[in-house]
Amino acid sequence: MIVELRSSVNEKRAQEIALDIKAFCIHYDGGYVLITSSSTKELDAKYQSEAERVTVLNDDMQLSSRAWKKETRTIDINGVKIGGSTNHTALIAGPCSVESEEQIEQSAQLMKELGISIMRAGAFKPRTSPYTFQGMGLDGLKLLAKMREKYGLQIISEVRDATNVEDIIEYADIIQIGAKAMYDHGILKRCGKTQKPVLLKRGFGTTLQEFLQCAEFILAGGNPNVILCERGIRTFETKTRFTLDLCGAAWMKAHSNLPIILDPSHAIGYAYGVPDLSRACCAMGVDGLLIEVHPNPKVAKSDASQQLNHDEFRALTGSLKSVAAAIGRKII
Amino acid sequence: MIVELRSSVNEKRAQEIALDIKAFCIHYDGGYVLITSSSTKELDAKYQSEAERVTVLNDDMQLSSRAWKKETRTIDINGVKIGGSTNHTALIAGPCSVESEEQIEQSAQLMKELGISIMRAGAFKPRTSPYTFQGMGLDGLKLLAKMREKYGLQIISEVRDATNVEDIIEYADIIQIGAKAMYDHGILKRCGKTQKPVLLKRGFGTTLQEFLQCAEFILAGGNPNVILCERGIRTFETKTRFTLDLCGAAWMKAHSNLPIILDPSHAIGYAYGVPDLSRACCAMGVDGLLIEVHPNPKVAKSDASQQLNHDEFRALTGSLKSVAAAIGRKII
Amino acid sequence: MIVELRSSVNEKRAQEIALDIKAFCIHYDGGYVLITSSSTKELDAKYQSEAERVTVLNDDMQLSSRAWKKETRTIDINGVKIGGSTNHTALIAGPCSVESEEQIEQSAQLMKELGISIMRAGAFKPRTSPYTFQGMGLDGLKLLAKMREKYGLQIISEVRDATNVEDIIEYADIIQIGAKAMYDHGILKRCGKTQKPVLLKRGFGTTLQEFLQCAEFILAGGNPNVILCERGIRTFETKTRFTLDLCGAAWMKAHSNLPIILDPSHAIGYAYGVPDLSRACCAMGVDGLLIEVHPNPKVAKSDASQQLNHDEFRALTGSLKSVAAAIGRKII
Amino acid sequence: MIVELRSSVNEKRAQEIALDIKAFCIHYDGGYVLITSSSTKELDAKYQSEAERVTVLNDDMQLSSRAWKKETRTIDINGVKIGGSTNHTALIAGPCSVESEEQIEQSAQLMKELGISIMRAGAFKPRTSPYTFQGMGLDGLKLLAKMREKYGLQIISEVRDATNVEDIIEYADIIQIGAKAMYDHGILKRCGKTQKPVLLKRGFGTTLQEFLQCAEFILAGGNPNVILCERGIRTFETKTRFTLDLCGAAWMKAHSNLPIILDPSHAIGYAYGVPDLSRACCAMGVDGLLIEVHPNPKVAKSDASQQLNHDEFRALTGSLKSVAAAIGRKII
């Protein structure tokens, strides 16, 4: 149950009621909002005069649901806007990992050349083997910050676990919570306490319901700026690395008020299919795409097989603009 | 191993060699072609002078593979062409089931109105419960044939099992082998003996390798006219009925020479997501789309939740034309 | 809804009522039973005096459900009994395929030596590639019949598709419907018209609900002798061939009145794990096990990797007896 | 590649070589062992005189593999031993969560009564919704410590994320890393630095290869005491909560040197199936079972549906002893 309190209710009183009805209390859109478990189906009569609107829900997808807020949220990344009524499809691109200053600068220059505002690159890599490249860590983040300054880019980079969430909050413009970390309470709760945008990736074994409930940890913690990212789920098919769930994306578009970004690169895991899949993602009318591109994929230290080279990516951006235009959207 | 015999080799000799090397023998593109198991890696020296070209393959995806024939096959459905160099994206639409003459005539009129050449509708329904509508059977096929005559449409309808394959071959212009029947040797072998185009749907629990191997049963039987159809695979996600595997479609485009058609309706199972998914499928650059549309979905006797109504479908076809144009293709 | 008519109601009257309420009519346990769709929730008042008992159900798992009949059905295979109150765990063993008289006779002799009553072997093989061994066909069935005569065994063999169901009904004592054929209406409906026991395997992409609904096709057709067989489902894990679903077996034991047989050989696909898995299956307290054993697995023409050799199988049967005894059951 | 150095090589020299060949260096079984990526296939000639044994492996399952160490590791939990040559099957039981002192004391008394040495209970719960019970936290751990003192039990409790790993290391005798946290580098690396036994649960979307590679993070960090736990994977089947992967357990028994524990309670998610599944797990010949039991399941604050009550659990332990005895093992 979501209770929007009247604007006359101050913070102290809001917290008081929250405590009594076992609710989270957040400040949202100029007022206080209380959220209880969805098993609570009624607001005590004594508080009803203080409530502007009460929304009773069937399950714990609450703040993220269109049942509560019909319109898609607008997320503002230092002036770069997605969602809401923007009709923007944001291209977010860059290499899997920061590997060196030279490499990441080539990537930054490509973003600049193509008019792309947001660059992605990992510094703390959640690899599945201890015997492979684990990322440059804090040094990688510092290189990303340098590129931001030099090229005026927004930076998105991934939290690996709760021990490095502070570093990401400090250095990145969008905090990425990866597929393997998306259930991590240490990360989710900390992200609820900042106002920086958070891109939450769906785990490859995660149901849509669980995915939105993880987003609720951040939203109920007080951060309204959550973006959902579908990046492929694990199925029986192994000719491709994962299976991009566009049916799930259609469901999220219909049921959630959070902007949606799709990641075709991690889904298929092979560069040959990324252009077609990217165009398909774009035609879904979502809020953005996350695409891996590397100056020299063959020598990439992680995910070498799925990264486009610069020429392939240039060609792709052209056709994405056409597809976006065909459905009344604009690539940014 | 695929052995293309020289044009000078006649049928009798071709069969003789086939018998000796345990191969299928088909007539393809003006000559005889022999196909052995992929575990055979070499043609006996005594036959080499009679071979034009020998293709050794790693697995049993042989006649269907781009490793053998680089170009996508062209399929000619009584003059309606897909695949090859056509750049056609065929819309194949119609209700889940033929329910009555009135209903199927309304569907046929819609196809006519929108310039769609191929109409789909099931007569023998492979339902999962014995206690639900099982289709009109032969009477349904006769109604479809009537619509073909009256409106000049091509008809695609589904074989339920080996006991009605003859009826479908007689009445339909494209034989549809459904997801539940795609391993059926009785059907596959019979379809190898006709030259009518066959649309083979991927089973929802079927790997891409198995899928192409099922197509091989038809191809090796002598029918070169096979179209692959991805219609959603079964995964852990249950908010949607199935998960449309566009990563798999990208893989098939890259590895198979057979045209590809996508079925977003069965994949998601809910009409609300069909338009976005259809545009995504179209943007993949495939050879066609299979979409369910019903004059009055609410009273449909099968798959009521996933069928578009006529107005929704009219709106969709408009946007599909724009998306197709954006990638240099044409909706037919 | 299941309507058990009073014993005074004769066949003609039963059929009359069935026609009126759109129900299947079967003869079961000495009387007539009508089954409608589960969406029918009430028997017309005019027929209530002719009904002994009416069972209203929530879904189309009806005749197979414990909600209708609490006790597990007893299946009598020419005197060999499983299910009911027998506490029998039947070992059903033999090679994947009949390959030659010598081979199948060695298998038959092993069954005899170990006191096993039911031998399995395939004659029509539903292979996934056209370029591999497809089974001996009718000749294989005749060899099986010969072994039955000579060694007093019961024979189970698989229907490949609707074109060979008559052959299997003629030659086998238990008709096996394999994982790939279990949705086949041609087979299911034909099996409903015989009284021979049918072992129905769950498809590897089939939900438990669909599985039981397929069994309903046979039961509603009039054949009460259906045995369910779980043989592994397809999941993301590929180190083993399939994933044996013992949680599903527990669910079936609790919810269905049909006997259950488990097939560890096809599930794991590798002989090394078959003994442990077989003991686990036995400890589940099910009605039987289906295990592949071959005189010389290395040269087997199909499923070579998963078949035990004779010595391994002898050792296994000893430990299965101990496990069965530990839970109060008896291996037959 | 695993390089076991001669006993004459001291730590300083071992670290020196490790640095040069980019290897982890651990102290194991009285000597130093270096582990490189499995892509390294040869030890430099200059170090060969210092190596006792070099094991070249095909993939990054190295220290955990039987290819390196044939025998199952023995894990000693303050005198309670599993694995190795013990033939012990450890029952690990207790409620899902610590809820109160009264509740957990009833659980402790049950363990005492039945001679069970290890009690499980969660204090930090990794729930999927923020709006449900999140566990008692540190207070819960203190209650568990109190029960350990009073009843002489070993305690296993779960790390939720990297922010509470120190608390679990301090209070528990076995550190449990749950299915949702198993990729967490913060936790895995910290657990590599203690010598306390770690029970690592397989993620429900995790392949066996990834699972063993996660164990490698702990092993390569220097902690040899890792126990693997299979607790069900996520599949298309939803009648049960997860699908217990006993084929996977068979694979792990054959390929890994780490002890294996199975968790039937979380797998099926419903108490009705837990006894049969527990007996099946026991018959697999694994090193232990993890079973949820609660003084009053109906009022449990988490996982209410899957917990056995005390009487059901008493009955189960009796039959588990019989099954274990039938395969030559002993329940502890």
Image (spheres, coloured by chain):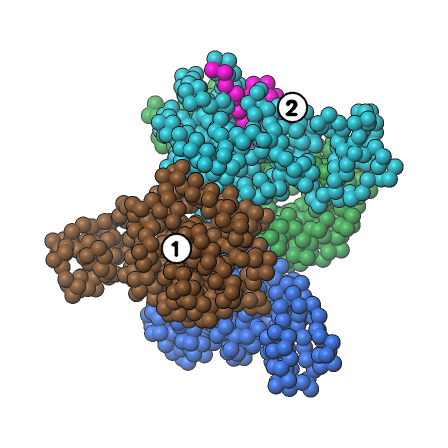
Chain colours: A brown, B cyan, C green, D blue
Disc 1 target residue: A117
Q: Residue at 45% of width from left, 59% of height from top?
A: A108
The reply to whether dot 1 and dot 2 touch (C-beta < 8 Å) is no
Callout 1: residue from which chain?
A: A
| Residue type marked 1 | Ser
Callout 2: residue from which chain?
A: B
Q: Position of residue A259 (x, y in %)?
A: 35, 50
Disc 2 target residue: B195
Q: Residue at 57% of width from left, 66% of height from top?
A: A132
| Residue type marked 2 | Gln
Q: Position of residue C105 (x, y in %)?
A: 79, 42
The quarter holding residue C97 reads top right
The quarter holding residue B172 reads top right
- Does residue B161 show up magenta in the picture? yes
Q: Which of labels 1 and 2 is toward the front?
A: 1
Q: Which residues are magenta?
A: B151-178
Of A15 and A178, which appears nearest the observer? A178
Q: Residue at 40% of width from left, 56% of height from top?
A: A118
Q: Position of residue A100 (x, y in %)?
A: 51, 67
Of D206 and C49, which appears nearest the observer? D206
Q: Position of residue C39 (x, y in %)?
A: 38, 32
* Mark 2 residue element: loop
> From where the camera sits, is residue D258 visible?
yes
Residue B191 against residue A318 in the figure, above or below: above
Q: Residue at 48% of width from left, 29% of height from top?
A: B331
Of B147 and B128, which appears nearest the observer? B147
Q: CA distance from mark 1 to mark 2?
A: 54 Å
Q: Quadrant of the N terminus of chain B?
A: top right
